[in-house]
Image (cartoon, rainbow, N blue to C red):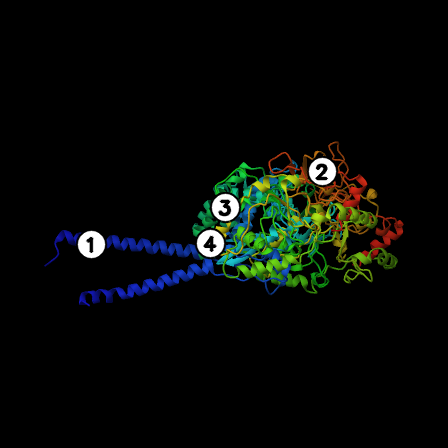
Amino acid sequence: MKPAVKRWLRRLAPWLAGLVVATALGAGLVWWKFFEPGQQHFANTTDRFNYGSLNGELVVGLPYPVFMILPRVFPDLIAKYSTQGYGPEKPAYGGYGAFGLAWEEGQRLPVGLSIRKLGYDRVTINCALCHTASYRLSPDSEPHFAVGGPAHTLNLQGLLRFLIAASQDARFSFPRLLPEISLNFPMDVLDEADYATVIIPAARTALHIARQQLGWMDAKPAWGPGRDDAFNLPKYILTQTPWDDTVGNTKFPALWGLGAKNGRLYHTAGEGKTLYTVVATSAIGIGSLPGRGFGERNKWIETFIANLQPPPYPGKIDKMLAADGKTIYQARCAECHSAGGTRTGTVIPLAEIGTDPERVRAWTQANADRMNVVVGLLGAGHAKIQGAQGGYVAKPLVGVWLLGPYLHNGSVPTLWDLLCPPDQRPATFFTGYDVVDFSHVGFVSTGSDAETHGFRFDAALRGNGNGGHLYGTGLSDDNKRALIEYLKTL
Amino acid sequence: MPTPQPMRALNRALRLIGALAAGALLFVALAAGFLYYDLSRDRPQTFYDDPVKQFEYGSTGGEILAGLPVGIFKALPKLCPDYLHGDSWAALGFIYQPGMDRPIGTSLRHSLGFDRIALNCAACHTGIYRATPDSQPVIVRGMPANRLDLARFTRFLTGCITDERFNPWQVEQAVRDTGTHYSWFQWQLLKYGVVPAMREAVLLVKYRFRFLDHEPAPGPGRFDTFNPEKALLNWPFEHLAPSETIGLADFPSLWLQGPRAKLDMHLHWDGNNDSVDERNRSAAFGTGAVPTTLDRKSMAVIAGWLRTDHNVPPKYPFRIDAMKAAEGKPLYDHYCAACHGMSGRDFSGGANGKVGQVTPIAKIGTDPCRLDNYTHALSAEQGNLYAAYPDERFSHFRKTDGYANLPLDGIWLRGPYLHNGSVPTVRDLLNPSDERPKVFYRGNDVIDQKKLGFVSAVLSEGGVPLFRYQTQCTGLDCPPPDTVTTCVPGPWAGNSNRGHEGPAYGTDLTPEQKDAIVEYLKTF
């Protein structure tokens, strides 16, 4: 080596060493501040299901301190988006509870929201958000929560629109958010710098992206409480398929009795062949990344929900009448709706069932193929789903009294209405009100309380059709009453 | 080779500029250091060797967010006497003791460059009584602040501070007139930093506390308990269900917290929390102390004293007719003890004891507004108060369906009665509601020795008008009569004196029997 080069090297060496050390320190700081993972601890499996992370923090996690104080900074937006589409007198209050989330007293956040540290505490959603039913027994009483039930009060679209609107608002800035955060979380200078330069701008950018990715929502009928566009979400977002004009609004299903469905088809239109596939693709859909722990966690969820049972019907049941109803049920319903029925878990073709067809049209085999490629690339190639199977799956009836409004699109408010011919089913009613309707079975959907607290459902809108499923509509009123009495016991 | 002349001059000039720049830098650094030192000093005034005084004058940490510089605190009553109807804080019911230049219930802390004053627990939980209008007032710690009008305090602050008079120069003059001395730097900070900052802060408070405009005036001895918490969470009040908007409640007593904690009693009027510590932290929000500013050491001393055996109500200082009291005891034991405890110290309720439990609204039948004001939604959201502090996070709040049965320790100092202070005396409470006074006057501190409670039928005391309390709406624009179990807003909503009546509550006993119970309750 030439002496000149040697001399240069000798002179550079300390600088190089310094650079390496500085880089290492910087990387360590970045890891500590933004990526150091934390552990969650739960007292029992239900709490884990309700508040456990699906490891989506990196992709879809919002910083907890920011998430927590947003309702306090944007009360006007909470009021606006938690009442849009509801009756004109709908009262609002602050906080995320306004969007109909099931919030247990004494918990940091509602059921379905997880707080886990990845550098800093981040909020993500899990299965329980859409699969916890909230109900009350009278207008003056307090809510009960049924694990695994359909979240018929959850206004998910309102919640998303609130978060997006907040991110578009000038108040979503460091100088406005920091003082609010500082009232609740101890912040040192380094924390403040993180929030100013990375955490708040990153959260805002993430919500800006969400706005673009969810832009198609505005051209379609509102989800309303208890529903989402279950398959257009992954179609447009996960697989980046160009937006089309389909409407796939569907009720959040219950998770009860899924364990008994082995060998049958899952999802509304038969897109899933195994329970594991349903769990895995749903998890990916809400940001859970395949990787270490992915399969194990999904197996745990599968086991947990396989054992879930609905709470028993809380009202009185006329045993004699129910016994009469059982006979009718065995003759007219069991084939499709009993756990052991020959057609239970199979797809009933549209031409036969006659219910609203939009949901079937929203998910083709081409959509499924594309999804399978993407999911395979993400590392979960074993979780393959298929296109809609030309009709709707006949589901075993478990916890029927908590499944209203009925049909896959929630277009029929009560069991009584479902047993009426379509032209006698209500063309509009109010949904998302949580008081149990003990006479018609379902939730109270008419009257001043429902109109005040409920979302106005219009069966004339695309995807909201309340036709079809004519089974039992020809029964006498007495027989209908008997059948409903029996359905209360399921 | 010698340096040429021009170069030498340039060198000299450069060196001079360098020295000047270094000097300037040093000055800026020193100034920044001073500012940092001066503004970041956080020193509360403490009385740790005297827990009673710590309760009276110690800090919750509220000054850091809500403290007024001492000079301004002293100047405000002089600056806006018209809002105060007086020229001292005493006009709002604050109590002064000899030897302290600030009232009981205020604390002092050096923070952000000033000695600053804020309220503490004792503001709402220290009261006074007198035997006759001519006797000396007696101060009682832990007693409901029977004369403090917190709503007028709020209106005074928001009125005065958003007033034209609250400008840098008039504030400076008013502060100078109080004899307060500040450094040049403090004066500049006060005039051009504190004055605009206070106006900003008060605009926020004025808007957040707008619920006061939609409910009857609380008057002395009362405030709204949970609407301020909704204000803290910035709930959209305009959109709340009407039944949830009115939260008037009397200040409670703080005596004997030890036994209350030991028996896991349900605290607050509606029994929504059975943790004394959470109750204390929740109440501290009312003094401006938030999770990041709460003075935990001081709170521990105060809470510790509240739990000691010394925190008891004073004995009834007037004559008790022992014969009559003895007649009252069996009646009390029969009608009252199960819900209210065997005595003023023994909080057990016997075999079917329900002390500290909640009686459903349909049964107790008292005004439902305060109950409806507290909702499941609020109790759930309280779960993220103190979220960053795992050991302190609120987890005990629960929505209840009625009002809690409270022990009656020191009952003679706790009038007017019921959660909304709608019944002036114990004797009136033993009558059916249509025989209870429809209108009476609150804020008097003279004990009504006959009926037990405070004198409630006189319109003014010492020339100062008392607060006229109306229990029901009587005009033409009254809402339809409200149901027993749901609050209907309107004039005087939340003020109803009904409920706690019927055979089980002793309201159909003979007048002699009722008098006997009153006599016996004097021993509590």
> Going from the N terminus, do you reach mark 4 or mark 3 first?
3
Task: Return the disc, 2 or 3, that comes first in the chain's sequence.
Answer: 3
User: How many C-alpha atoms fall within 10 Å of the one at disc 1: few (<14), some, or many (≥20)?
Assistant: few
- Residue B523: in sight, yes or no? yes
Q: How many marks?
A: 4
**How far apart are the alpha carbons under marks 1 and 2?**
92 Å
Q: Residue furthest front?
A: A342
Which numbered circle lies on residue A237? 3
Query: What amino acid is at disc 3?
Result: Ile
What amino acid type is highlighted by mark number 4? Leu
Question: How far is disc 2 from disc 4 in space, using C-alphas?
Answer: 48 Å
The amino acid on which the numbered mark 2 sits, given as a three-letter code, is Thr
The residue labelled by disc 4 is A377
What is the x, y in percent for residue A193?
Answer: 44, 54
Task: Say which chain tag 1 marks.
Answer: B
Q: Secondary structure at mark 3?
A: helix
Cα distance in 3D space between marks 2 and 3 = 36 Å
Type of amino acid at the residue the image marks with label 1: Arg
Chain where mark 3 sits: A
Mark 4 residue crowding within 10 angstroms, few (<14) / some (14–19) / many (20+): few
Q: Which residue is mark 1?
A: B12
Q: Which residue is disc 2 drawn over? A: A446
Q: Nearer the viewer, mark 1 or mark 3?
A: 3
Q: Is there a contact, CB below 8 Å, between mark 2 and mark 3?
A: no
Mark before the other along the chain sequence, 2 or 4: 4
Query: Mark 4 and 1 residues: CB-CB less than 8 Å, in contact?
Result: no
Residues at circles 1 and 2 in contact by the CB criterion of under 8 Å: no
- Residue A298 point in image, percent of width and height: 57, 58
Residue B53 position by quadrant? bottom right
Q: Depth-wise, is mark 2 or mark 4 nearer the camera?
A: 4
Instruction: Look at the image and tell me in which quarter the N terminus of chain B lies.
Output: bottom left
Element type where label 4 sits in the image: helix
